[in-house]
Image (tube, rainbow, N blue to C red):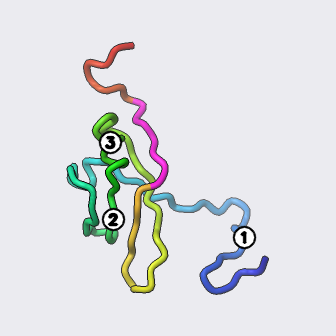
Amino acid sequence: MPAGPGRQGPLAKGTQLAVRKVTWQKVGGVTEPGRYMFTFGWLTVAAEDLVIWQQFPDASFTLVKMATTDDVDEFHLGAFELSENPPPGGES
């Protein structure tokens, strides 16, 4: 399928996509679901995202850009990764 408006063509071999991730600390430890303004744009945090951060405070989420009609960057949280460092006091 050819590239067109809103579409990109295939990536050249060896090209890497920049994946932006955020941690709970990076977003100020928000405690309520909602829409927040950060230096990278607007971020919508869902209640389900907060549950993960409460259980795994060092987890990092991928920022997923939302389609908007404005010239404003809007994101929501996508897949998450758990830190390789276990939480303090964790049992093996």
Outermost front residue: 47
Residue 12 % position (x, y): 71, 67
Outermost right residue: 1
Residue visible at 79% across and 76% down?
Answer: 1
Residue type (three-letter) at the residue carrying disc 2: Leu
| Residue identifier under label 2 | 43
Left or right relative to 2: residue 58 = left
Residue visible at 37% across and 41% down?
Answer: 59
Residue 72 % position (x, y): 37, 80
Residue type (three-letter) at the residue carrying disc 1: Pro
Badge 2 crowding class, 10 Å Cα cut-off, few under 14, some 14 to 19, many 20 or more, is: many
Task: Pick whichever of labels 2 and 1 is earlier in the sequence.
Answer: 1
Q: Nearer the viewer, residue 26 or 50?
A: 50
Task: Pick whichever of labels 3 and 2 is earlier in the sequence.
Answer: 2
Task: Pick whichever of labels 3 and 1 is earlier in the sequence.
Answer: 1
Residue 45 % position (x, y): 32, 57
**Numbered tag placed on residue 10 in the rendering:** 1
Q: Nearer the viewer, mark 3 or mark 2?
A: 3
Q: Is residue 22 above or below residue 34?
A: above
To which quarter of the image does residue 63 belong?
Answer: bottom left
Residue type (three-letter) at the residue carrying disc 3: Val
Badge 3 crowding class, 10 Å Cα cut-off, few under 14, some 14 to 19, many 20 or more, is: few
| Residue identifier under label 3 | 51
Q: Nearer the viewer, mark 3 or mark 1?
A: 3
Give the position of the C terminus as an image quadrant. top left
**Numbered tag placed on residue 46 in the rendering:** none
Gap in Å between the C-alphas at discs 3 and 2? 17 Å
Residue 51 % position (x, y): 32, 42
Q: Is residue 73 above or below residue 50?
A: below
Residue visible at 21% across and 49% down?
Answer: 29
Q: Point out the stretch of residues depicted in magenta.
A: 78-84
